[in-house]
Amino acid sequence: MLVKKANVNTVILIILITCLTLSALNASASPSIVGEEWDPRVYARTVQETINMDNVWKHIVALSSGGSRFPGYEGYEKAVEYIYNYLANELGLNAFTLSYKALIPYDYNSTLTVLLPGFEKKIRVYALLPNLVQTCQTPPGGIEGKLVYVGKGEVKDFRGKDINGSIVLIHYNTKSNWMYAMNLGAKAVIFIEPRYTVRGEGDYKVLQVPIKFPRVMISRKDADFLLSLLEKKGEVRVRLEVNMFWKEVELKNVFALIPGRAGFEKLEDIIIIATYFDAYGVVPAKTPACDEASSAAALLEFARILKEKPPYRHVLLAFFSGQPLGMAGARYFAEELFFRHWSKPLIVNGSKGMISLTGDQVKTVFVLDLSSDSPALALVTHGTFYGGFDWTRAGNVQDMESYIKYKIGGEYKVIEKKHVVEGRKLTFYERIYAIGGKEYKLYFALSGLDREGLPSQVNHIGEIFNHVNIFAVTFFTAHAARIYWETPSQTLEVV
């Protein structure tokens, strides 16, 4: 099945977080409560047998089939509803939402109208991201011009064509060639939706200067109609109406509280397991973001496992919104809980009753940031969202790294620089860890910042919690280019 590429990633992630969550909880629990030491290998095998990858795939399909998941768009709203319904109604967990305000570039039904004598045809087009604050919204009534097709937009494609005052039709995978049209006096450019594209193409389509030059995307089907019309008529006039504007919307974070195992629930420590569920896209109204749904889908399946096999202490599952808006949802939550409610309870109405939370209850945060590119994982604390991170701000990071390696990897002999992993010696640099009888490749980008397998820039939710001195580890897919992310081509076929 198509999800096979994501299988290993998700399995590793769920197993590791399960082991780390319970071992971290167990580590600080009183021996009189815990009893004998918890064996992660036994629990890992149980988790391996419990994971249902069909469930994960079902969640990916559901989250990515409702339209664009750019914050504030239809698919985003459906994702909020789906996640909350699954947690509250299907699993019966005590779920709740926290809302905040944000500004988004909202594309409200931008259109292209074909103007022929006695005939008009209106076609839906999709505005690209603003050039900084400039949404490139057209004036009332739109802009009109002759439609000119320039293919790939190379210099030779413009020869002999009157571009000044026209509206140019061009293929999407053409880097910055559209700027030739702008410099030659075109009024706007229409990109033909590609079958496949990569994230880097989007970087060429949005400028870091507030130039007002409308840029939209049209579907391949509608583009074929325009091309056939040009071939038949020779000259076609069109009217473009770009209706993208800045809109204040209410966004929601979705949470569910899983109480600790019977006999342990009086211990007030809370572990947060978090991810994001919306997505960034260079064409906000066409952001299916199927692969980006992997993390949320994995956490939903993990919620089912934790419901069936409760942890020692409380676990708060957090699905954050606003990822394309500077991780706005996670930042809002961190400010609300750790600055306004550190010791004063935050009281919320959950689906199963009232919930009281304080910031000082939170001991550790685990974050999922998965893609289906690779089976390798990096455990990350550092990041570049704040321009660089000094890991010493999270004071127990080295102790936690040592503890994690011990729990999942077995004995580590410092002098020999060898891990003893279930009876087999491995050098540290092999980065192989055996869990539940299976081997996984991990990179510990914690205190040592093992950069191999990571991109030059890594922005992740864990940074936010580390910056408020709450230790956070992000499970980030290593050796993953995520080339389809942020594109309209990021469909189920590439997951």
Image: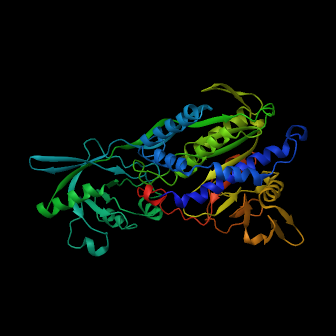
Q: Position of residue 48 (x, y in %)?
A: 66, 53
- Residue appearing at x 53%, y 34% in the figure: 85
With 454 as the anchor, is 400 left or right in this view?
Answer: right
* Quarter of the view holding residue 29: top right
Q: Residue at x 66, y 38 (%)?
A: 307
Q: Residue furthest left?
A: 118
126 on left or right of 5: left
101 displayed left or right of 229: right
- Residue 4: x and y, percent? 53, 59
Relative height, residue 195 to residue 119 (above, below): below
Q: Which residue is nearer to you in this view: 181 or 152?
A: 152
For residue 271, say whether it is visible. yes
Closest to the observer: 105 or 314? 314
Total marks in image: 0
Left or right: residue 7 versus residue 306 is left
Residue 425, percent from left and from top: 81, 71
Name the residue: 63% across, 45% down: 302
Q: Could you tell me if residue 490 is visible in this image?
A: no
The image's colour scheme reads: rainbow
Look at the picture and state if 219 lies above or below 443.
above
Q: Position of residue 239 (x, y in %)?
A: 22, 49
Q: Quadrant of residue 220?
A: bottom left
